[in-house]
């Protein structure tokens, strides 16, 4: 009996490893995904999906689930809707929003510089400033957990942002997770998204349907941003290599960003945090 159980366990482990290689090996991948990866027009979210391949429906950090692929939601505490304007970081009297952070000593010097470049992406043309944590009670704790993920908005106290090395070390990926920490959800989660994009449900993995839900978010009176760093790519969670999100107006519109925040991403930050004089630059 023990031998049978051992064989079953080994067989299961090999199946999982085989599945992981099948999903993301260089020899296989949804056709659309492989083609845009080879062209170099992938998005930050594409990299996050790869890094979080087996985290989508699992519990992380004890009692925390991932929503939409990379937004951490605690199940053990009272649920709180935390979209734009509801869980913002406080603003200083000098007009800046200082977000304290602590960084794991496990990161190398190069990785630390990459994280800081991701922060600079957000700081440029906004009033947000990331500062090393000293006495602050509320701060971001950047850790080498499993995958790339963040809580949504300011939660109070220590809150984790997971940046696993090397999977999460694109500058765009880092900025994407910090945008979640600032309080922003994915662009295609907007309640009005069906005016701008079509979600191709038959092409999506069934166990990832929930990643395409809509939420009543505060759009801050800004237009839909196809090129937001917070937008899913066209082949996000594709089960057959076909597009899962298609722009309504033109198939030539690129969805998402790989490296930088879009102009509208900057406007979102400035409007949410009332960055004086920066709103419409």
Image: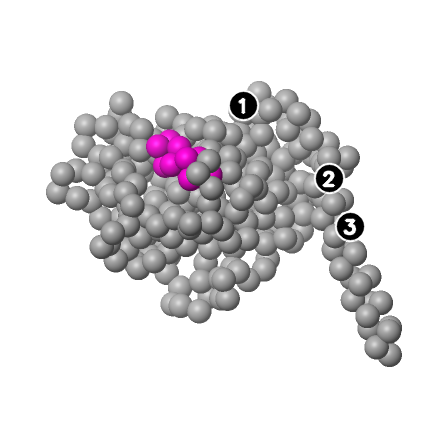
Residue indicated by mark 3: 18
Quick check: can you spot residue 26? yes
Position in image of residue 21 (x %, y %) = 74, 45
- The answer to whether mark 3 and mark 2 are in CB contact below 8 A is no
Q: Which residue is mark 1?
A: 253
**In contact (CB < 8 Å): disc 1 and disc 2:** no
- Quarter holding the N terminus is bottom right
Q: Residue at x 58, y 25 (%)?
A: 41
Q: Secondary structure at mark 2?
A: loop
Query: Which one is in front in this view, the residue at disc 1 or the one at disc 2?
Result: 2
- Relative depth, front residue between 85 and 183: 183
Secondary structure under badge 1? loop
Q: Pick whichever, 7 or 83, lies toward us.
A: 7
Counting residues from the N terminus, which is met first, the one under dot 1 or under dot 3?
A: 3
Q: Residue at x 41, y 54 (%)?
A: 160
- Residue 27, horizontal then vertical, whole percent: 77, 35
Q: Secondary structure at mark 3?
A: helix
Q: Which residues are magenta?
A: 111-121
Q: Which disc number belongs to residue 25?
A: 2
Image coords of residue 222 (percent x, y): 34, 32
| 8 relative to 47, above or below | below
Looking at marks 1 and 2 on the same chain, the residue that comes earlier in the sequence is marked by 2
Distance Cα–Cα, label 1 vs label 2: 28 Å
Q: Residue at x 45, y 58 (%)?
A: 73
- List the single residue furthest toward the bottom: 1
């Amino acid at each position: 009996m023990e031998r049978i159980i051992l064989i079953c366990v080994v067989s299961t482990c090999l199946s999982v490893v085989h599945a992981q290689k099948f999903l993301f090996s260089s020899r296989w991948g949804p056709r659309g995904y492989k083609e845009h990866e080879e062209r170099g027009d992938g998005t930050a979210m594409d990299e996050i999906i790869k890094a979080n391949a087996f985290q989508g429906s699992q519990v992380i950090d004890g009692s925390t689930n991932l929503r939409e692929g990379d937004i951490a939601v605690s199940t053990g505490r009272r649920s709180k809707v935390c979209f734009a304007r509801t869980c913002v970081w406080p603003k200083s009297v000098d007009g800046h929003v200082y977000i304290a952070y602590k960084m794991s000593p496990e990161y190398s010097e190069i990785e630390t510089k990459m994280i800081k470049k991701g922060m600079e992406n957000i700081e440029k043309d906004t009033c947000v400033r990331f500062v090393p944590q000293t006495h602050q009670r509320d701060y971001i704790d950047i850790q080498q957990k499993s995958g790339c993920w963040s809580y949504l908005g300011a939660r109070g106290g220590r809150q984790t942002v997971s940046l696993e090395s090397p999977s999460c070390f694109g500058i765009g990926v880092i900025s994407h997770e910090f945008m979640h920490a600032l309080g922003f959800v994915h662009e295609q989660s907007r309640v009005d998204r069906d005016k701008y994009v079509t979600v191709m449900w038959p092409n999506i993995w069934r166990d990832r349907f929930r990643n395409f839900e809509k939420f009543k978010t505060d759009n801050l009176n800004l237009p839909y941003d196809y090129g937001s760093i917070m937008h899913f790519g066209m082949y996000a969670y594709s089960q057959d290599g076909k597009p899962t999100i298609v722009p309504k107006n033109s198939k030539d519109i690129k969805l998402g960003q790989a490296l930088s925040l879009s102009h509208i991403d900057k406007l979102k930050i400035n409007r949410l945090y009332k960055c004086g004089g920066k709103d419409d630059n």
